[in-house]
Image: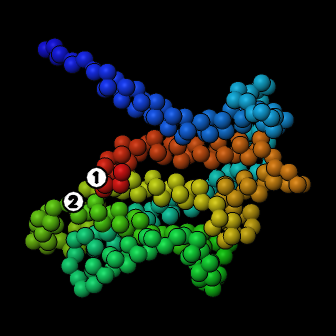
Amino acid sequence: MTTLQTPLRGRDRIARAVLYAVLVAGLLAVVGPFLWMLLSSLKPEPEIRQVPATWLPETFTLANYRELFDRLDFPRFFANSALVAILVTAGNLFFCSLLGYALAKLRFPGRRALFLLVLGTLMVPGMVTFVPQFVLVSNMGLVNTYAGLVLPFLAGPFGVFLMRQYLLSIPDDLIEAARVDGAGEFRIFWRVVLPLCRPALATLGILTFLSTWNNFLWPLVVATTEERYTLPVALALYSVGQGRIDFGLLLAGAVVVVLPALVVFLVLQRHFLRGIATTGLK
């Protein structure tokens, strides 16, 4: 079957051309810095410092990557970053979905006040709570431990809000039917509700993993020895020395740091986009 396509009018063509131009400009603004970082990591140090800066390397080299793996205890720092990011992500998925289920589907006194409290904490800048968090972790004796790196971030108000909004879309009749069959609340949450939350869980998982993987300030303060350094902290500390910054090492490390986060996003992007659409975060 053939379809007839209505020819675009002059105004529509101009509007579409403007739209494409804006999209291309936005794409270049987002991809451009990463592309420059990738290409510059393949240049020798003098060429990176060259003014004006160039895009393509005149002398191609992998020396920056060899120096990265020679100077840094890369497996240890990578493992620390991965462990912290995975534990924080798992904690957010479990605790935020559990509290989101309580706020969305359970009826108890103070539920509305608790939700307003969550919204209120969502508006508090993270830097305001930084010092109290560190004092608390220090008093608990968790400085320079994995627990100190992970515990303060096992749940967050944004995750609770995200999961609560998604769980509101799940029919109450489904939960009531499970209750009639004799299932307890945790069993309903774990066996009935949670499997229906994959898009929201994927969205929360990606956002939490990315923010934790790239987190720099908290690990810099809490981790006081090399054994607990995460990759961003180690990269920043080892690329600065003797009054100068080793840009080649820094750029090569930045490329390596970005890759795991990029892989996670590409693997879960379908669920991520669906979760963004269904929770209204667009």
Asked if labels 1 and 2 touch by Cβ distance under 8 angstroms, the answer is yes
Which residue is outermost to the front? 11
* Numbered tag placed on residue 278 in the rendering: 1
Q: Position of residue 193 (x, y in %)?
A: 24, 62
Count the numbered circles shown.
Answer: 2
Residue 203, placed above or below residue 36:
below
Task: Looking at the image, tell me whether mark 2 or mark 1 is earlier in sequence order.
Answer: 2
> At 65% from the left edge and 65% from the top edge, which residue is drawn?
217
> At 58% from the left edge and 71% from the top edge, which residue is drawn?
127
Based on the displayed image, in which of its 4 quarters is residue 243 positioned?
bottom right
Residue 59, placed above or below residue 204:
above
Residue 243, placed above or below residue 112:
above
* Numbered tag placed on residue 169 in the rendering: 2
> At 39% from the left edge and 53% from the top edge, which residue is drawn?
203
Q: Identify residue type, mark 2.
A: Ser
Closer to the camera, 145 or 42? Answer: 42
